[in-house]
Image (spheres, helix red, strand yellow):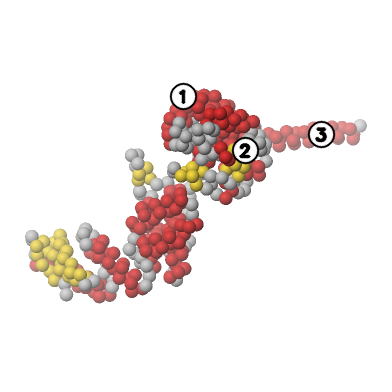
Amino acid sequence: MASIRSRYGKLVVDFYYMGIRCRETTNLTDTPANRKKLEKVIEKMEAEITLGLFNYAKYFPKSDKAAEMVALNDRKECINTNTPSFEQFAKLWFLEKEIEWRDTYKRKIKEIIDMYLIVKFGTKPIHLIKKTDVLAFRSSLAKVTYGKANKHLSAARINSIMVPLGMILKEAAKRYQFDNPYYDINALKQPKTDIQPFTLNEVWTFINGVRADYRNYYLVRFFTGMRTSEIDGLTWENIDFNRREIVIKQAYVKGKIVPPKTQESYRAIQMSPWVYDALKEQQAITYKRSDYVFCAHTGEPLDYNNVNKRVWHPTLKILGLKKRNAYQTRHTAATLWLAAGESPEWIASQMGHATTKMLFNTYSRYVPNMTRQDGSAFEALVNRSQIAQVSTDKETSQ
């Protein structure tokens, strides 16, 4: 039975919850009217405790004990229903799934679980998580800021956080036979990737204007479409001068050599004459002192953040070229190949894409400006056919 006490002129509720004695100080001063008011609140509290509906944090939101009581109630619920908490199941799920993933992806998922999911859902029995909880969590992510500029999380980042949550809830729903609260929740729409390819003139302007010790590096990037991680992890054993091929078998990601991004990323890139010459020249520079084709003075792989800061961005600025990220070298290779009329299937294989769909969805709109094949070729075809038809009609009439 709860009782009302007074402390320093404020009313205190003294009650038991889940076998624990709790004393919570209210904002009410000790007056007869406030005692009557608090008695009614206590009656409701006791009824909710009896029915198992009591929400400690609702009645005492500023209490230091609120989080402890919520966690204790969650544990009790888990024991009574023989269902794990979200944290328990998330950790089990991760242990079961990690064998399927490469190290970089494991680190990414572990970071999301620890930084976001457990913080939000932690001790909550996993079968009690509702769709409204999931949607509220996603909405809260949109308010998260980071960095000195207090930028908000992008739609892409929010989606990447929600993906493992959806996978965890889906698996738990199957195992413990409850309705999946993530069902029918769609990913946020993401803006199209900002593609800013270089023109061919801009490519040569950059290559001829960059520091001499990085000329070969960027020439290979512009004319092969290799990802940053692929060229930074490229070793001499994967250069075949006889077949004029660059074999992609690995990538350098966050200080580690890892498998390529996808199965299609395992590929052989054909060397153009410019790439062949650049690699031959590079061979004389780094072959004897490093396993890596392009490396730091220590022989270790390049640090792309350092290279971007000290070489890429300063070169763009000095040459008066539009500011953009170094990944645009890959996009440039794709647009130049398309503009030259290369087979889309061949381009997809060189880029490490499974199909040609991405080529047409992402790059094709940049090609007309480079080739002037923007409908004028069709107009010329129709004009030629009209001229031919007029000529034929004249001959017939004669």
Q: Amino acid at mark 3?
A: Ala
Residue at 51% x, 29% y: name it: 214
Residue 52: percent from left, percent from top = 28, 73
Residue 207, quarter of picture: top right
Q: Earlier in the sequence, mark 3 or mark 2?
A: 2
Tell which of 109 and 191 is nearer to you.
109
In the rendered view, tell whether residue 356 sits above or below residue 1.
above
Residue 93: percent from left, percent from top = 43, 62
Residue at 9% x, 65% y: name it: 6
Tell which of 77 and 135 is nearer to you.
77
Indicate which label's residue lies in the foreground, 3 or 2: 2
Helix, strand or loop status at disc 3: helix
Q: Earlier in the sequence, mark 2 or mark 1?
A: 2
Q: Earlier in the sequence, mark 1 or mark 3?
A: 1
In the rendered view, tell whether residue 94 sits above or below residue 291.
below
Helix, strand or loop status at disc 2: strand
Tell which of 372 and 111 is nearer to you.
111
Q: Amino acid at mark 1?
A: Ile
- On the image, numbered disc 3 is attached to which residue? 388
Other residues around mark 3 within 10 Å, as few (<14) / some (14–19) / many (≥20): few
What whole-number distance in Å separates the C-alpha atoms at marks 1 and 3? Answer: 53 Å
Q: Quadrant of the C terminus?
A: top right
- On the image, numbered disc 1 is attached to which residue? 318
> Which numbered disc covers residue 240?
2
Outermost residue, front side: 288
Indicate which label's residue lies in the foreground, 1 or 3: 1
Q: Is residue 82 visible?
A: yes
